[in-house]
Image: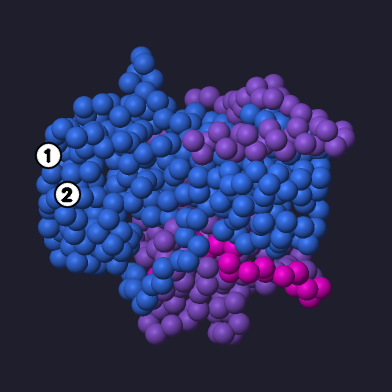
C-alpha cells in the first residue's frame, strides 16, 4: 500500500499577530507550524503502516522553501518520503488552483492507494482541498473520518455527521479527510529525527507537474479576495462591577431579570 | 435563474439548513429562487414547504440509492440541476454534507467556491455575489468574488440566520425527477449507521451557559451544570476547556466548534477570543461574567458583570431557587 499525506505549513493561530494597517497576518518563519489538523492525517496513515510493514507513507506539501521544515518534522514522526511543491507561480492560488496542483503531483508521483488530509487548515479554514482533489483525480472520497482500519476490499472508515455515526467501506483509491478523533501522532524519536535530517526531499515546480502558469496562482483561481477587514463587533450593554455583597446581589438580580425577559 | 439553494434531507424530512438557505436566497433574489434536493423520496407536502418558504422552482432528484449522502451520485444530481436551472449563484450549507458535496461538484464544473460564509450580498454595480467569511482563526474577515466563473458558489454557516418562515399562498413549481441508475456509482458502501445521542443539543438550544478558562478547575463544573439545569440551558464551552478534556468536543462553541444562535447566552469566565465570539455573536441576548474588566467578550455583552463566577454562580443559583423558575 502507498499512502500520501498532504500537509500545510500555517501560522500558529494561537500566537498569530495581525498587521493593524493592512489587516493581514504577520508571517515570520518562527511562527510557522504544521497545520495541527494535518497531524491527524499523518497519524491515520502511520497507524495503517503499523498493520502493514511494506506500506509507504509519503508526505507532500506545497509552499515556500521554508515548508521543508514541516516535511522534515513529518519524516521525523515516521513518514518514509517527502515531496515539496515549490514555485512562485503557485502563490495566490485559491482552493481550486491548489487542488489542481496537488492532484497533478499525486498523479505524477503516484499512484497512491489512499490520500489522507486534515479536515481543513487553520489559516484558510476552507476544508475544500481534499474533496476538490478527489474530484480532480476521479477517486473516492470520505470526509470527517474519525477512525480508519483495513477492511475487506478497502478501508473501513467511521464518519461523523451532524446526525449519525456512519461506517463506510471505502473502495480504493480514495481521498480520506480525518478529524481530531483519529488521535495524536506522538513525538518524534531520536532515530526518526536523525534519519529525517539526512533524507533528501525532492522539490518540483508547477511546470514539472505538467501545468501551465496560467492554470495556477491568481490567474488560475476563479475566486478573488476583494476586501479584508477586522470583524466588527460591539454592543452597548449595562455593566455592573461586583465589589461587595450588595453589588453581587444587583448583578445576580440583573442576570435573572434578563434571563426571564426572554422567556416571555 | 438567479439563485439556487441546495436543500438537505434525511429520513424523508427536510433539514433545517434548507430553510436558512432560503432566508439567504430571499435577501439576494426574491422571486428568482430555485431549490435542489436529493433524497430517497420526499412527499409533495414536504417539498411544498420549500415553496411556502420562498422557492419558485423545486427540483427533487429521487432514487433508492440517494437516501444517504455520497459524493459521486449527489454531485451528478447537482450537475444536472445546474444544467437545468443555469443558476448564477449556488449556495449550500456548510454542513458535513455541503462541505463535501459542493467542493466535489465545484471542481467538476471548474468554478469557484467560498467556504463557510457568514454574509452574502449582491454587489450593486456588477451584480456579483459578495461572499464574506472569517479566516485565520477568525482574526480577519475576507470578502470574496467569483468574477468570471459560473455558478458563483458558496457554503453558508448553519445556525447563523433564522429559517425562512413558511407563508401560506406562495406558489411554485415542484418537479420529482427519478435519478438514473447510472448515478449509483460510488467508492463508498454503507456498512452501518447509528444516530448520535447528543445531536444538535447545543446548536438548537434556546439558552446556553458557556464556560471558559475562568472556571480554573474541572471540579467547579458541577456548579455550572446545576445552574444550566436550573435555567433549562445547554452547556457550552470555549476551545481551551475542550482541549483540556474537561468537556467533550460536542460542547465547543466557536470557529472550530459549533455556531449557535440562542435567545440567551450566558458566558462564565469566558474572555472572548475571536475564535469563540465568531460562534456565538448572533445570540439574541448576551450576558458575560468575567473578572477582567477589559475582557473582549464585554464588547458584545448586553449585560456585563465584572466579577468572579465563583461568587456570581452560587448566588445566582440561590436567587433562581428562591425566585422560582426563570
Q: Element at badge 1?
A: strand
Colour of the chain lettered B: blue
Q: Which mark is residue B173?
A: 1
Task: First in sequence, mark 2 or 1: give its number.
Answer: 2
Work out which residue is located at the far top of the displayed protein and give it: B125
Q: Position of residue A63 (x, y in %)?
A: 61, 47
**Observer-nearest of A33 and A143:** A143
Locate the N terminus of chain B by quadrant.
top left
Q: Is residue A136 in sight in this rendering?
A: no
Q: Which mark is residue A225?
A: none
Chain holding disc 1: B
Locate the C terminus of chain B by quadrant.
top right
Left-right relation of B161 to A11 = left
**Observer-nearest of B214 and B253:** B214
Left-right relation of A215 to B57 = right
Q: Position of residue A92 (x, y in %)?
A: 53, 36
Q: Which chain is purple?
A: A
Q: Position of residue A189 (x, y in %)?
A: 78, 73
Q: Which mark is residue B45?
A: 2
State the residue at coordinates (43%, 55%).
Answer: B96
Work out which residue is located at the far right of the displayed protein and give it: A244
State the residue at coordinates (16%, 42%).
Answer: B84
Q: Which residues are magenta?
A: A173-192
Q: Is residue B223 in sight in this rendering?
A: yes
Left-right relation of A180 to B105 = right
Q: Position of residue B124 (x, y in %)?
A: 36, 16
State the residue at coordinates (20%, 39%).
Answer: B51
Is residue A179 in the magenta section? yes
Amino acid at each position: 500500500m502507498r499512502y500520501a499525506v498532504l500537509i500545510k505549513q500555517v501560522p500558529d493561530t494561537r500566537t498569530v499577530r495581525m498587521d493593524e494597517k493592512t489587516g493581514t497576518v504577520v508571517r515570520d518563519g518562527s511562527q510557522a507550524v504544521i497545520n495541527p489538523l494535518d497531524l491527524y492525517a499523518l497519524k491515520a496513515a502511520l497507524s495503517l503502516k503499523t498493520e502493514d510493514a511494506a506500506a509507504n507513507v509519503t508526505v507532500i506539501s506545497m509552499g515556500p522553501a521554508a515548508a521543508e521544515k514541516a516535511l522534515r518534522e513529518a519524516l521525523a514522526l515516521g513518514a518514509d518520503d517527502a515531496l515539496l511543491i515549490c514555485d512562485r507561480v503557485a502563490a495566490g492560488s485559491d482552493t481550486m488552483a491548489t487542488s489542481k496542483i496537488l492532484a497533478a503531483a499525486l498523479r505524477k508521483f503516484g499512484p497512491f492507494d489512499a490520500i489522507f488530509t486534515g479536515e481543513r487548515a487553520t489559516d484558510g479554514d476552507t476544508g475544500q482541498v481534499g474533496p476538490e482533489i478527489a474530484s480532480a483525480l476521479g477517486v473516492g472520497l470520505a470526509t470527517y473520518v474519525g477512525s480508519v482500519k483495513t477492511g475487506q476490499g478497502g478501508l473501513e472508515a467511521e464518519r461523523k455527521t451532524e446526525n449519525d455515526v456512519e461506517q463506510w467501506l471505502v473502495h480504493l483509491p480514495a481521498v480520506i479527510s480525518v478529524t481530531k478523533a483519529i488521535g495524536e501522532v506522538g513525538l518524534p524519536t531520536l532515530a526518526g529525527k536523525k534519519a529525517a535530517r539526512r533524507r533528501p526531499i525532492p522539490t518540483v515546480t508547477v511546470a514539472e507537474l505538467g501545468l501551465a502558469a496560467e492554470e495556477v496562482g491568481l490567474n488560475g483561481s476563479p475566486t478573488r479576495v476583494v476586501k479584508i477587514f477586522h470583524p466588527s463587533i460591539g454592543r452597548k450593554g449595562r455593566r455592573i462591577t461586583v465589589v461587595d455583597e450588595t453589588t453581587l446581589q444587583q448583578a445576580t438580580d440583573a442576570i435573572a431579570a434578563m434571563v426571564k425577559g426572554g422567556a416571555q | 435563474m438567479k439563485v439556487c439553494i441546495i436543500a438537505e434531507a434525511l429520513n424523508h424530512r427536510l433539514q433545517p439548513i434548507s430553510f436558512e438557505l432560503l432566508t439567504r436566497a430571499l435577501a439576494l433574489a426574491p422571486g428568482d429562487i430555485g431549490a435542489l434536493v436529493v433524497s430517497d423520496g420526499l412527499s409533495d407536502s414536504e417539498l411544498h414547504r420549500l415553496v411556502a418558504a420562498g422557492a419558485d422552482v423545486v427540483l427533487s432528484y429521487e432514487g433508492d440509492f440517494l437516501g444517504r449522502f455520497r459524493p459521486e451520485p449527489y454531485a451528478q444530481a447537482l450537475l444536472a440541476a445546474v444544467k437545468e436551472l443555469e443558476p448564477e449563484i449556488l449556495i449550500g450549507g456548510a454542513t458535513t454534507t455541503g462541505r463535501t458535496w459542493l467542493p466535489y461538484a465545484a471542481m467538476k464544473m471548474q468554478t469557484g467556491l467560498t467556504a463557510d460564509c457568514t454574509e452574502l450580498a449582491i454587489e450593486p454595480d456588477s451584480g456579483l455575489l459578495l461572499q464574506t467569511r472569517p479566516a485565520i482563526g477568525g482574526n480577519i474577515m475576507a470578502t470574496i468574488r467569483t468574477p468570471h466563473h459560473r455558478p458563483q458558489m458558496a457554503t453558508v454557516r448553519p445556525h447563523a440566520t433564522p429559517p425562512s418562515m413558511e407563508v401560506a399562498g406562495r406558489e411554485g413549481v415542484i418537479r420529482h425527477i427519478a435519478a438514473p441508475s447510472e448515478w449509483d456509482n460510488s467508492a463508498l458502501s454503507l456498512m452501518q449507521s447509528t444516530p448520535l445521542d447528543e445531536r444538535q443539543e447545543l446548536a438548537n438550544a434556546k439558552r446556553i451557559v458557556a464556560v471558559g478558562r475562568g472556571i480554573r478547575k474541572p471540579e467547579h463544573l458541577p456548579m455550572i451544570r446545576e445552574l444550566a439545569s436550573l435555567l433549562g440551558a445547554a452547556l457550552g464551552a470555549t476551545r481551551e476547556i475542550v482541549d483540556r478534556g474537561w468537556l467533550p468536543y460536542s460542547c465547543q462553541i466557536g470557529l472550530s466548534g459549533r455556531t449557535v444562535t440562542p435567545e440567551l447566552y450566558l458566558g462564565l469566565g469566558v474572555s472572548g477570543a475571536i475564535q469563540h465570539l465568531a460562534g456565538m455573536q448572533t445570540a439574541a441576548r448576551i450576558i458575560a461574567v468575567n473578572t477582567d474588566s477589559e475582557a473582549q467578550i464585554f464588547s458584545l455583552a448586553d449585560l456585563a458583570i465584572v466579577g468572579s463566577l465563583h461568587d456570581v454562580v452560587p448566588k445566582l443559583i440561590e436567587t433562581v431557587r428562591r425566585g422560582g423558575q426563570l
